[in-house]
Image (cartoon, helix red, strand yellow):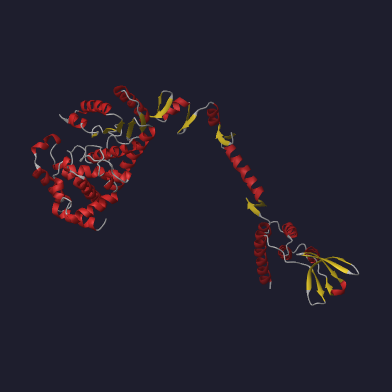
Amino acid sequence: MEKRARARVRRIGARLVLLLAMGAAAPAFADEIHLKSGGKIVGKVEEVTAERVRVKTPFGVQSVARADIVRIDYKPTPAEEFAARLEQTDRQDVDALVALADWARSAGLKKEAERTLRLVIAVDPNHRVAREALGHVLFEGVWMTRKEAEEAEQRRAEADRRLRGLIRYQGEWVTREEMEAREKGWVKVGDRWLPPEEANRARGLVQVGGEWLPRHEAEARRRAGELEQALGVKLETAATTRFRVFSEFGVDQARAVADAGEKALGLVRERVGWLEPVWKPEEPCELVLLRTPGSYMQLVDRIGAATNQPPGWADYAKRQTSFYTVSPPASVQHAGGRRAPDMIFTAIHHVGHIALHGIHPGYTYPPVWLDEGFAVWIEHATLKESLTACSTTGYGVASPRQDKWSQSAHWKANLKAGLADGSVVGLERLMVARLNELGWMEIAKAWSVVDWWIQTDRERFLRFVKEVRQRYPRYDKHAEAGPADFLRFQTEALEEVFGLSPAGAEKAWRSHVSAGS
């Protein structure tokens, strides 16, 4: 019997907590006026006279003729009912009090329910059901309101901070050392507080014209000054840890080129899987974008002399609109009638050339088709299309047919069409083509072969680059080798890495293109 009673109290307690949480609505307690017509009006009788009865209902106050009424059943209000129940309840019986609180809440008497719960905790201060129904929490063994608990926790936390020697300063808890340092205007670097200039130096910043800059940006500013003085032009600068961009076309273009360069190198690491640095960190790649051929040619002469380029290199570069060097890494171009936003493509194209040469540095130049294919692969991977033609019309000059080829989808469609009509040259022919023999179809195929190898087996792609570059003669010795020699070097590398002849690789690539990959 006692177990059943306790179980009932637990059920009542759970229901009480739920009702308090939900703010349950009370059922309607009201008088009932029975009419001769058989109907009934439910409400609270407010006034009774010899002629009429005035009753308040949920729909408003109604006045009913006494002659139409059979009888009136008066019922106590919830408050009257509660008072009667409380009068009959033992104030020391917590189970009965909890039950009464449950009834009061169900009757919509929130204040009476809370009053009854307080009677419970007066008898049993640790009564969990009553405490939780009242919204109390147990904090360090003591029941209290949530606000009291939050205040107690705050007092405890503040006491703990003071024990640790902290001081409240400008809304924060800090050490005395930090407070004194802040009042002096010092800056925290690591675990030390330093005067502003010393802090900037500790962060690796350099002061340039009253402005504190990261070392790589300061060096870029210094280098820009050298170029401006040498060329007589105004250059905007953008710098990252791996690129310095100098542009006559505004700082926004310079920043766009620097960001694209960083993205290009990120894609080399992500998709090609090559994790070695492309060039020495202390020697970032310089990308120079000029307006006129005059400034461009001045820079050709300066860079040619500084990098000890082979005879004839400067004359060749001057006939183009752009050139690049691998060591030190640099790309230089002039507008050549192009729009400034389009020059970013040439810069990223050159980054592709430099990146390929940076794979297994120290070896000779890669085959022309591989070099060009990787450069346009970088353009497409970074910028989603290619606007650079190092072959058909000179470096950085857009072809009249460019609109038919620039996007990857167009290249793939043209390659498929070329396979159908026989206009796509075989891989063996591509391997021995010279730069001026590469048309758009050949460039598209070179890009597609590189993309196919990187997609399917990037480790083998990197090995092929290494193997073929190990076999190739130095650039200044290329004249001593003929097309048959270059074909042999590449054939040996293909067989070594892929186990395929040029014909076998051609067949596999055609299947790849035909499948629409």
Up-down relation of residue 267 to residue 121 (above or below): above
In the image, taking residue 431 as reference, residue 195 lies left or right, namely right
Counting every numbered tag in the picture gives 0
Q: Looking at the rendering, which quadrant does residue 24 occupy?
A: bottom right
Q: Depth check: 267 or 85 in front?
A: 267
Residue most toward the front? 400
Q: Looking at the rendering, which quadrant does residue 267 occupy?
A: top left
Q: Looking at the rendering, which quadrant does residue 240 occupy?
A: top left
**Could you tell me if residue 459 is visible in this image?**
yes
Up-down relation of residue 127 to residue 149 (above or below): below
Up-down relation of residue 306 to residue 464 (above or below): above
Which quadrant holds the N terminus?
Answer: bottom right
In the image, taking residue 441 as reference, residue 14 lies left or right, namely right
Residue most toward the right? 50
Q: Depth check: 360 or 322 in front?
A: 322
Q: Which residue does the image show at 17% across and 50% down from the upper left? A: 497
Residue 61's x, y, as percent?
80, 64
Residue 160's x, y, as percent?
59, 40
Residue 475's x, y, as percent?
15, 36
In the image, taking residue 117 as reference, residue 177 lies left or right, namely left
Residue 174's x, y, as percent?
55, 34
Q: Which residue does the image show at 16% across and 47% down from the upper left? A: 430
Q: Depth check: 382 or 278 in front?
A: 382
**Could you tell me if residue 501 is visible in this image?**
no
Which quadrant holds the C terminus?
Answer: bottom left
